[in-house]
Image (cartoon, rainbow, N blue to C red):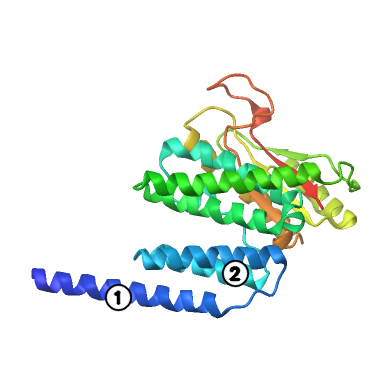
Amino acid sequence: MSGILIRTAAISSLLLVSACAGVQLLEAEVTRPSGSEFDAQLHKGYLALSESRFSEGDFTNAGLFADRAVQAASGTGVNPEAIDARKLPDEKVAELSRARGRLVRALAGGSARKNPADSARAQVMFDCWMQEQEVNAQAEDIQQCRSEFLTALAKIKTASRLASPTPKPIAKTGAYVVFFEFNKADLTPDAKTVLTRVVHDAKETKVSKVVASGYTDSIGAADYNARLAKRRADAVASFLLKSGIEKENLLVDAYGENLPAVAPGDGVSEARNRRVEIRFSR
């Protein structure tokens, strides 16, 4: 193929991608939020990100953020980006995993209802951080998204401390724990028994959120363990969804080898750390 044909094909492809992103952005702009205030703030934030990326010529991410804006506006729920949704530098996986975990815990604790603007800002800026970290080209852009995420998260925590310190407890407050075999994400018969109990108790107490958090032991690379923890959490989520837990009531998170139940030391096999914890929240 001649150079002219190659350039023509490349230009045609770029025009197609930009046109698709333009349609997605237009849909996000005309869609009006129909959910909660948190959903409306998410729509606003993702729309701004989409418009920014479109103006920069990053049509792929412009379309992605436009789609998330539309989803948020629908009120069906949109979670912070999963760690494995982006090709992140290996050395950044642990930090972003911890950051996402802090955000998910805040959302599960009711921050979206109590402080919708800052909660939405934290989620949008986390996704911005994820996107910029994947590109890994502009240190200032990465730092800006990261800094704005941390600022919004700090406001959430400040508001939480100022709230009533004695909220009414739900009937079931302890964590349910299921364990996994080494380097596996398959549910054991014992795990399924525990999860059946989780479904029963969640329906009985009418909780608003079920949070499933995946972990591993410290054997292996941190980035691999982050992905393994996510697979374990996803296996639990799949069982819960098939058993009647509503998708919008379920939050899934993964911490890899971070936050071990016991700390035997790096590179040590510990069955108690190969787990998924399931908690209820209002």
Amino acid beneath label 1: Leu
Q: Give the label on residue 207, or none.
A: none
Q: Which mark is residue 71?
A: 2
Q: Nearer the viewer, residue 73 or 275?
A: 73
Characterize the local packing of mark 2: few (<14), some (14-19) or many (20 or more) Cα atoms within 10 angstroms.
many
Image spot of residue 149 (x, y percent): 56, 48
Q: Position of residue 82 (x, y in %)?
A: 55, 51
Q: Amino acid at mark 2?
A: Gln
217, above or below 75, in the image: above
Residue closest to the eye, 145 or 175: 145
Tell me where residue 193 appears, x and y as whole percent. 78, 45
User: Which residue occupies 83% across, 48% down?
Assistant: 197
Quarter of the picture holding the N terminus:
bottom left
Residue 82 lies left or right of residue 4; in this view the side is right
Pick out the residue farthest to the left: 2
Q: Earlier in the sequence, mark 2 or mark 1?
A: 1
* Label 1, residues with CA under 10 Å away: few <14, some 14-19, many ≥20: few
Residue at the image position 58 percent from the left and 39 percent from the top: 98
Q: Residue at x 43, y 64 (%)?
A: 52
- Distance CA(mark 2)–CA(mark 1): 25 Å
Question: Disc 1 designates what residue?
Answer: 15
Q: Residue furthest top?
A: 265
Q: Measured from the top left, where is residue 115 in percent x and y?
A: 73, 55
Q: Is residue 186 visible?
A: no
Choose between 58 and 154: the one closer to the eye: 154
Say whether residue 221 is left or right of residue 270: left
Q: Is residue 265 left or right of residue 198?
A: left
Q: Secondary structure at mark 1?
A: helix
